[in-house]
Image: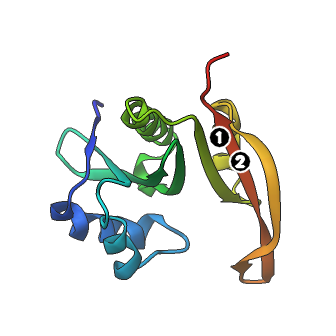
Amino acid sequence: MTYVYRPASRDDLANILLLDQIANPHPWGEKLVTQSFDQPQKRINILVLDQAQTLCGWLTASTLFDESELELIMVSPQARRQGLAQGLMQAWFASIESIPVHLCMLEVRESNQAALALYQKLGFAQVGLRKNYYATKSGKEAAILMNLNLMKD
């Protein structure tokens, strides 16, 4: 299957909100998704579409000066394990090359082993831990803070 990565626009909001409900175990909801399109000069929103133009994934990140932070990435359940999250991450990196960004940051639930493996594969390193940060059904779990330095030596 061929996939297309492209910038998202407000015209995509309904499909992103639907994806948020079916693919995100902790949905953002309409308010946060809509806010991700505010301040377009500081926001990056990327979609991945299949051949039928069906939304398969979404990434949103913010950029300030020479730093960019991944805010959310999700892939629809039926499209997982096909490299789409990695493709979204690479599209994010490509979108910030011209800024230029020197540091990419993110946080991830400690229980999200698939995401942790992807981020480590892409070169992110753990730089911190926020204990008891995320609510879970059985209590709280930590957020792992990760950075990727894009500076060329």
Residue 61 lies, in percent from the top left, at: 45, 53
- Are the residues tagged 1 and 2 within 8 Å (C-beta)? yes
Residue 151 lies, in percent from the top left, at: 62, 26
| In this view, the mark in front (1 or 2) | 2
Dot 2 amino acid type: Met
Dot 1 amino acid type: Tyr
The relative height of residue 87 versus residue 9 in the rendered view (above or below) is: above
Secondary structure of the residue carrying numbered label 1 = helix
User: Where residue 119 is drawn, which disc sits there?
Assistant: 1
User: Where residue 132 is drawn, which disc sits there?
Assistant: none
Quarter of the figure that contains the N terminus: top left
Binning the other alpha carbons within 10 Å of mark 2 as few (below 14), some (14 to 19) or many (20 upward) gives many
Q: Does 151 sit left or right of 4 as displayed?
A: right
Q: Residue at x 75, y 74 (%)?
A: 133
Q: Residue at x 46, y 75 (%)?
A: 28
Q: Give whichever of 39, 78 is nearer the camera.
A: 39
Q: Which residue is mark 2?
A: 146
The relative height of residue 85 versus residue 54 in the rendered view (above or below) is: above
* Quarter location, residue 135: bottom right
Give how far apart the Cα atoms at labels 1 and 2 are.
8 Å
Q: Does 114 sit left or right of 4 as displayed?
A: right
Q: Give whichever of 95, 119 is nearer the camera.
A: 95
Residue 110 lies, in percent from the top left, at: 77, 59
Secondary structure of the residue carrying numbered label 2 = strand
The relative height of residue 102 versus residue 145 in the rendered view (above or below) is: above
**Residue most extreme to the top:** 153
Residue 95 lies, in percent from the top left, at: 37, 36
Q: Does 106 sit left or right of 89 as displayed?
A: right
**Residue most extreme to the front:** 65
Quarter of the figure that contains the C terminus: top right
Q: Residue at x 35, y 72 (%)?
A: 35
